[in-house]
Amino acid sequence: MSTAFLSIDLDAIAANWRALDQASSDTVETAAVVKANAYGLGVARVATRLAAEGARRFFVAAAEEGVNLRRALGPGPEINILSGHMEGDTKLIAEAQLTPMINSADQLVRQLESLPGAPFGVQLDTGMNRLGMEPAEWAALRDIALAQNPTLIMSHLACADEPDHPMNPHQLRIFKEMTAGTAVPLSLSATGGILLGPEYHFNVTRPGIGLYGGRPFEQAATVVRLDLPVIQLREIDAGETVGYGNAWTAERPSLIATLAAGYADGIHRAIARDTVLWAGEYAVPLIGRISMDLITVDVTDLPVEVPSALTLLGDQQGIDVLADTAGTIGYEFLTDLGNRYKRSYLG
């Protein structure tokens, strides 16, 4: 094997969806967020499997993503566009039967004038200040929007991964105030909101990162395994250095493995500090700088023969461990995984 190997466990994604579905209240519909090509893992494969598990409502970021998803799923499931009805999207929305989540007065006018009678939802801003109508704008447009029978009204929690953060009850209160008296299905919670409890669930929950094995769903099954091939072993003496900038100096005679992957594959340079790879049950330290296509690992103390590949992601070490080391989040690490990997799908 000369190419890094990325294994994606569709059974694990399905198990995570079922677990989050069970964590949602009994009367709540559990949707699935598959934006950014299902967080980089392949939207056609992932969404098809989730549809087979029972997901009937999906969320993507943009209309173009929705078109690709519709090709994979065929007619039937509802595909919601979080960016709403952008200028130039009308034909895509109509032909792929997409449901835009309207974010502003301009988008509402565009929807009602260009696609009268077509389905749409509404996104409200309850304090995140990112997408959605603010309270005053919604108050002015509410009667007009509700008269058209939107399919969903949603908002998004800013701090759901911190259960005790005061922003959570604040946004919950604002969302209840903005939607009081409506008969439209409501949605406030992604993965973190599901874990906050039933008060946050409303009618539809929208798990995203939890489906793919990331925080804050600590009980998630492992979805991704990344094995990096060993392309060379080199013995060096004490005092010799490894990598750009002489970033690592051997304090003893050492055996160094060079692996075929690097930051061009989404393995951030910043993870070199305190990061390990795995040879089965044995951890070996990453050393030196990560370069574009290569990583170096100290395998001197490995008590078994050096295998043909070492594992960077898997059961021993998930995306959030590496993200913590790099000073980022699991979402970024996952969606950065590149296109050079040889991919396989389990399940």
Image (cartoon, helix red, strand yellow):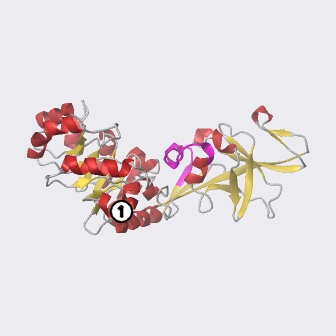
How many C-alpha atoms fall within 10 Å of the one at disc 1: few (<14), some, or many (≥20)? some
- What residue do we see at 43% from left, 67% from top? 15
Quarter-of-image position of residue 102: top left
- Up-down relation of residue 136 to residue 74 (above or below): above
The disc labelled 1 sits on which kind of residue?
Gly
**Looking at the picture, how far across and down is residue 121, in whole percent?**
21, 46
- What residue do we see at 28% from left, 69% from top? 26
Q: Element type at marker 1?
A: loop
Q: Nearer the viewer, residue 49 or 82?
A: 82
Q: Is residue 26 left or right of residue 313?
A: left
Number of numbered discs: 1
Q: Which residues are magenta?
A: 325-343
Quarter-of-image position of residue 117: top left
Is residue 34 at least partly visible in the picture? no
- Up-down relation of residue 313 to residue 148 (above or below): below
**Looking at the picture, how far across and down is residue 110, in whole percent?**
17, 33
Asked if residue 161 lies in the magenta stretch, the reply is no
Q: Nearer the viewer, residue 217 or 247?
A: 217
Q: Nearer the viewer, residue 285 or 258?
A: 285
**Looking at the picture, how far across and down is residue 260, in whole percent?**
67, 45
- Up-down relation of residue 129 to residue 232 (above or below): above
According to the picture, the residue beneath numbered tag 1 turns out to be: 197
- What residue do we see at 31% from left, 57% from top? 200
Quarter-of-image position of residue 195: bottom left
